[in-house]
Amino acid sequence: MIVCHCQNITDHEIATAIDWMRAPDPLNIIAPRKVYRALNKQADCDGCMPLFLDMMRRTDTFEVPILRQPGIATGQAPKGKDTDTHKATAMSSAASVKRIATS
């Protein structure tokens, strides 16, 4: 199906471009501009953008895989020696702010 009539881009080309970009780096963030660039084209009137985005979202490899590392999803610092460094940095930053406030 033709998604962009101005540049003659099909849904198959969008999926192929996303697969091509995702192959070397599965964590690559893919935006419409990157898809256009991969196809050696550029957006013209943007009338196709809602359909273009819909086709991108429907592509199996569009989503970035979720990383299951401590602190990534929860916003918490990872446990271990890095935690001690994080606490020390936070305490020294707080002390600096206190010194500046009392000056």
Image: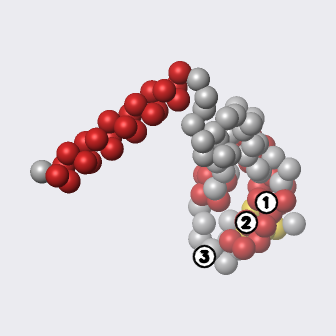
Residue sitting at x 25%, y 42%: 96
Q: Position of residue 85 (x, y in %)?
A: 45, 27
**First of labels 2, 3 by sequence position:** 3
Label 2 environment density (alpha carbons within 10 Å; few <14, some 14–19, many ≥20): some
What residue did someone put label 1 on? 57
Callouts 1 and 2 close, C-beta under 8 Å:
yes
Along the viewing direction, whichever of 33 and 39 lies nearer the viewer: 33
Q: Which mark is residue 53?
A: 2
In the depicted structure, whether residue 85 falls above or below residue 58: above
Residue sitting at x 77%, y 71%: 51
- Tell me the element at label 3: loop
In the depicted structure, whether residue 29 falls above or below residue 86: below
Callouts 2 and 3 close, C-beta under 8 Å:
no
Camera-near label (2 vs 3) is 2
Q: Residue reaching furthest front?
A: 102
- Tell me the element at label 2: helix
Q: Which mark is residue 45?
A: 3
- Tell me the element at label 1: helix
